[in-house]
Amino acid sequence: MATPLQEFDKQQAIRLEANCLVGIDEAGRGPLAGPVVACACFIPPALSHDFSDVNDSKKLTEKKREAIFHRLIRAEIAYGIGYASAAEIDRLNILQATFLAMRRAAQKFLNLPHAIALVDGPYPAAGLRLPQEPIIDGDAKSLAIAAASIIAKVTRDHYMNLLDKLYPGYGFAGHKGYGTAKHLQALRELGPCREHRRTFAPVRKLLTPSILP
C-alpha cells in the first residue's frame, strides 16, 4: 500500500504529465555560518516502495536521517546537490542564494524530456530551467521533496562537521552554524570566521565598519 507521500507524487505525475518528477529542497537558510545546500532528487516509481520510511528531514532523528541518506545515495535514484557559499549569501541575500543552490542542484535534469520540478515552499525557484510547481510544506507531502530534504540536510551537516575541524572553537559540529547560545558566545570571543554570513544581524553587529562587506 502506498504511503501518502508516494501517492501524492503519483497524482502529481499524472496531473502534470511528468515522466520525471524531481523534488527540490534546501537546508541551511537560517544559520549564521556555512552554505545553503539544495538537492534535486528523482526516485523512479519502481523504487518508491523501498523508501516508505522517508519523511520530512525535520521530523526524523539524526540517526534515522543518516540511515536513509546512505540508502538513498546507494540506490539507483538520480540526484544533484548544489551549494551557495556564505559569501554568495552575503552578496545575493539568502532567498536568491537558495535559488542559486537549487539551480546548481537541478543541472543534471535539464535535458530530460518531461521532467518537472516540485519545489518546496511558496515560491518558484527563480531562474530554474525546468517547469516547476511550488509546494507549500512539500517536504511533508511529497516523497521526492522529502528525499531531497534528507540529502540536503545530511550533506550540509557533513560539511559543517568538516568546518568544525577547520575552524575549531565555534562548535560547528554541534549546532551546524545556527545561532545557539554557545555559538553566539564563541562569536563574541573569537569574532567571525570566513564561513560566517556577515549580513546576518548577530554577525554583522560584531564587525567593525572597516571590514563590513
Image: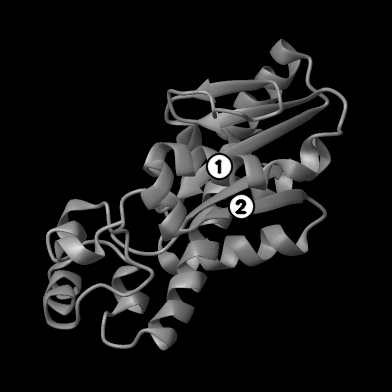
Q: In x, y percent, where is residue 205?
A: 12, 59
Q: In x, y percent, where is residue 56?
A: 46, 45
Residue located at (56% from left, 46% from top): 101
- Vertical position of residue 117 compared to residue 90: above or below: above
Can residue 145 be seen in this snapshot? Answer: yes
**1 horizontally vs 199: left or right:** right
Residue located at (36% from left, 84% from top): 167
Quarter holding the N terminus is top right
Residue located at (43% from left, 72% from top): 160
Q: In x, y percent, where is residue 70?
A: 65, 67
In front of the other: 92 or 29: 92
User: Disc 1 marks which amino acid?
Assistant: Leu
Q: Secondary structure at mark 1?
A: helix
In front of the other: 41 or 213: 213
Residue located at (78% from left, 14% from top): 17
User: Disc 2 marks which amino acid?
Assistant: Gly
**184 horizontally vs 148: left or right:** left
**142 horizontally vs 176: left or right:** right
Which residue is tagged 1? 100
Can residue 3 be seen in this snapshot? Answer: no
Task: Tell me how far mark 2 sits from mark 1, CA to CA.
Answer: 8 Å
